[in-house]
Image (cartoon, grey):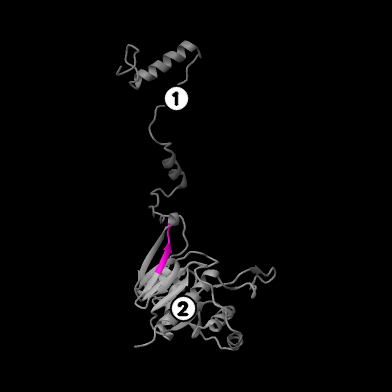
Amino acid sequence: MSAMLVVAALRWDAGRTRVHPLTGAVECDALAGGAAAADRSALEHALRLAERYGGRCVAVTVGPAAAEAMLREALACGAAEVLRVTGPDEDAEATARTLLDAVSRRFGAPDLIVCGERSADWGTAATPALLAGLLGSAQATGLIELTSDGAGLRAVRRLDGGRRERLDVPLPAVCSVERGSATLRRAPLPAVLAAQSAAVPAVRAEGPGARGRVRTGAVRPYRPRPTVCPAPGAADPRERLLALTGALEQRTPPRLVTPPSPAAAVDELLGYLREHAYLDAAGSEAGA
């Protein structure tokens, strides 16, 4: 029987960044970057569970070369191996696919993945659930306690109103822990010095099914296709203009009251209303 594989999925946070005013390049502060508090708690939980089950703990992150300092700290604290993955990470789903593809290719299917509840930069908390969905395993998110009794995992989750929920989590599983749920152990000085010169392997992963994924484009208002209308029959522009304006249609010509007087204008108006059946012959409104 192979040893249990516990993966600490860490998120590298760039910390403070600034954009160069001339070149437009994004520059990161190497001293400010690193793992968030929740990810440090996840690493400690992964180390404890690997020791409890007699397995090995592997620390993995999807990030640039600057994330190697975070992985070297994981090595110094007791991780058996580390791995830096490069690949699609534009959203939570792409990050989960890239990470799981690299772990499966290099180490095999993980028995347990422990990660922070949410990253310090985006904070969507979607990656743990996506990892569980892709792995087809159980998931327990937002944990404040994560232990083992030898037969399985025991977890405690925070609920609203100060309540707590106790969970029995079967393996394989993906668990996300809150910050402060565990304090990362202090690495001994010899391990820190050895980790400084250790090689951090880096692999490129595309993510399973990356080529077959459907991606949406930019969201724009709906614009129907233009309707093709037949050309007018008349070739002469003057005839087309007369047809559009209705100037050649039969119509009643205007009448001029001469000499102008109020009585003649009233008689002309009443005659027009009787002619078009708005008034009857007696002068009352038609249909009244």
Q: Is residue 193 above or below residue 236?
A: below
- Marks 2 and 1 sit apart, C-alpha to C-alpha, by 100 Å
Q: Which is more toward the observer, 125 or 180?
A: 180
Instruction: Name which residue lies at 45% across and 72% down.
Output: 94
Quadrant holding the C terminus: top left
Tell me if label 2 and label 1 are in contact, CB under 8 Å.
no
Extreme residue in the left direction? 287
Residue 48 numbered tag: 2
Instruction: Name which residue lies at 48% across and 64% down.
Output: 124
Q: Secondary structure at mark 2?
A: helix
Q: Which is more toward the observer, 94 or 272?
A: 94
Instruction: Name which residue lies at 46% across and 47% down.
Output: 237
Mark 2 or 1, nearer chain start:
2
Q: Is residue 248 above or below residue 40?
A: above
Q: Which is more toward the observer, 232 or 68?
A: 68
- Numbered range of the magenta stretch: 155-159
> x and y percent of residue 275 in the render?
35, 20
Q: Secondary structure at mark 1?
A: loop
Magenta stretch: helix, strand or loop mostly: strand
Residue 254 numbered tag: 1
> x and y percent of residue 259 in the render?
50, 13
Instruction: Name which residue lies at 61% across and 70% down.
Output: 15
Residue 281 numbered tag: none
Q: Which is more toward the observer, 282 or 168?
A: 168
Q: Quadrant of residue 142?
A: bottom left
